Amino acid sequence: MMREAEQLAHFGSWQVDLVTGKHKWSDETYRIFGYEPGGLQVTDETFLDHIHEEDRPVVKNAIDEAVLRHDSHPCEFRIKDKFGKIKHILSSILVKRDHKKKPIQLSGFDLDITHQKRQNEELALQNKQLIEIAWIQSHEVRGPLARIMGLINLVEGQQGKEANVKELLKPILDSAYELDQIIRKIVKKTEAIEPKITS
């Protein structure tokens, strides 16, 4: 049941004997790292080799913190699996101690949160694009629209003076063209967001 639960939730469990240095991984932990169960000889070195270079200090510090100061410690980091694929891992490190409070075992769970991370990044990008669209609507649209409205008011005041009316038509058309370009810009940005929202 535990194996099935790990596979369904995409999390793995592990243990490290601090006395012998022996590592023990569950089947799903191997799969998260891109291997078939038992397909990697796990040591401190092979484990750290799979940690993203930028996150190795984070992992080492989390282990040190757990051993020295805490009985449990959370840690989030990236790994490169067997095929070089980057995955985001949320881990919880637990420390087992002997009767003298000396740490003798580390254990914990690795949860693959890659999918959630990607969703969050997509949502952040969509939010940024929506903010840009809102800014365009509230700032850029108002300028030409205000000019058009002002010029129309002038035209209404020039009834019977055809020469003056013709002079006012060009800036009205220019402002209308500018407004059309801004609307096209908004539509283009909106179309770029729609596939991600519906996926």
Image (cartoon, grey):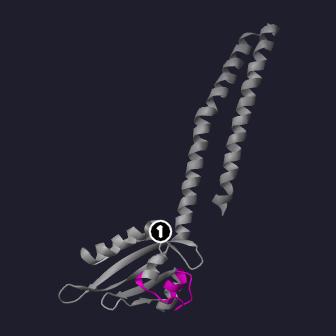
For the record, the magenta segment spans 27-44
- The dominant secondary structure in magenta is loop
Q: In this figure, which residue is indicated by the disc labeled 1?
A: 53
**Image vertical order of residue 40 relative to residue 134, above or below:** below
- Taking the magenta stretch, the answer to whether it contains residue 151 is no
Image coords of residue 10 (percent x, y):
52, 80
> Which quadrant of the structure image shows residue 58?
bottom left
**Image vertical order of residue 136 relative to residue 5, above or below:** above
Closer to the camera in the image, 127 or 113: 113
Left or right: 55, with 182 as reference point: left
Residue that lies at the very extreme toward the front in this rendered image: 45
Image coords of residue 54 (percent x, y):
46, 65
Q: How many marks?
A: 1
Closer to the camera in the image, 34 or 144: 34
Residue that lies at the very extreme toward the left in this rendered image: 100
**What residue is drawn where x is 59% and y is 43%?**
132
Left or right: 132, with 176 as reference point: left
**What residue is drawn where x is 34% and y is 70%?**
61
**Image vertical order of residue 124 relative to residue 182, above or below:** below
Which quarter shows the C terminus? Answer: bottom right
Image coords of residue 148 (percent x, y):
69, 23
**What residue is drawn where x is 34% and y is 75%?**
63
- Taking the magenta stretch, the answer to whether it contains residue 39 is yes
Q: Amino acid at mark 1?
A: Glu
Left or right: 45, with 189 as reference point: left
**What residue is drawn where x is 42% and y is 90%?**
24
Image coords of residue 1 (percent x, y):
48, 92
